[in-house]
Amino acid sequence: MSDLEKVDTSDWLENTKRFCTAAHVDNKEVIWNTIFSHEENETKDWPLHTFYNTFAGWNQVNHHEYTKQYETKFFEEIERYVKNKGRFITESMFYSMRPTNRVSPDAIARWTDLLLKVKEEQPDNNFFINLLKDTVSYLNIKQRGQDASTQYLISPKGMKFYKK
């Protein structure tokens, strides 16, 4: 990065640094605490692309073992976050950081329960309701796809791949 700073002072370099900082496994807790802080902090001055790159960097597919501890925390913080942040920041955070890595009936039920709660308590919050509906739909489709793949692999046709 220091070599790039000598030749590039554009937003691209700053965005790359944000992404890489958030992607580093040792920074998961610091980034989480910065994003979901209950206190005013540096994020109040972040432009939208700083948020985007931080969110995208934080949730790397191969880092699930480092981010799974935040799944419960996500559900504890999401309603407050939606209430306090703007639409574009919230939408980016939601789709980048939502815990949808593991699909199970329990995971789908957790999202469905949150959806029902928000529909009851905030019936006019269509933005949040639609984010939650989209997530429940996504998880149901993902679950059906995994089930179909499993059924195929254990079928006689799928077993052909395992023969030597």
Image: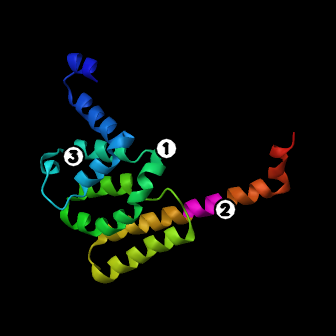
Q: Residues within 10 Å of mark 1 (few under 14, many from 20)?
A: few
Q: Is residue 66 placed above or below 141 in the rendered structure?
A: above
- Residue 50: % across, % down: 23, 42
Q: Is residue 42 left or right of residue 104?
A: left
Q: Residue furthest bottom?
A: 120
| Circle 3 residues within 10 Å: few <14, some 14–19, many ≥20 | few
Where disc 3 sits, the SS reads helix
Task: Answer with mark 2 or mark 3, whichever residue precedes in sequence.
Answer: 3
Q: Secondary structure at mark 2?
A: helix
User: Quadrant where the N terminus lies?
Assistant: top left
Q: Which mark is residue 48?
A: 3
Quadrant assignment, res 39: bottom left
In front of the other: 111 or 130: 111
Q: Which-is-in-front pick, marks 1 and 2?
A: 1
Inspect the image, locate mark 1, and give the three-letter code of the amino acid beneath it.
Answer: Asn
**How far separated are the C-alphas under marks 2 and 3?**
38 Å
Q: Give the mark nearest the N terminus, 3 or 1.
A: 3
**Residue 144 picture quarter:** bottom right
Image coordinates for residue 18, horizontal then vertical, percent = 27, 38
| Residue linked to disc 2 | 147
Write down the quadrant of residue 86 in the picture. bottom left
The x, y position of residue 117, in whole percent, is: 35, 79
- Identify the residue under disc 1: 62
- Tell me the magenta residue range: 141-147
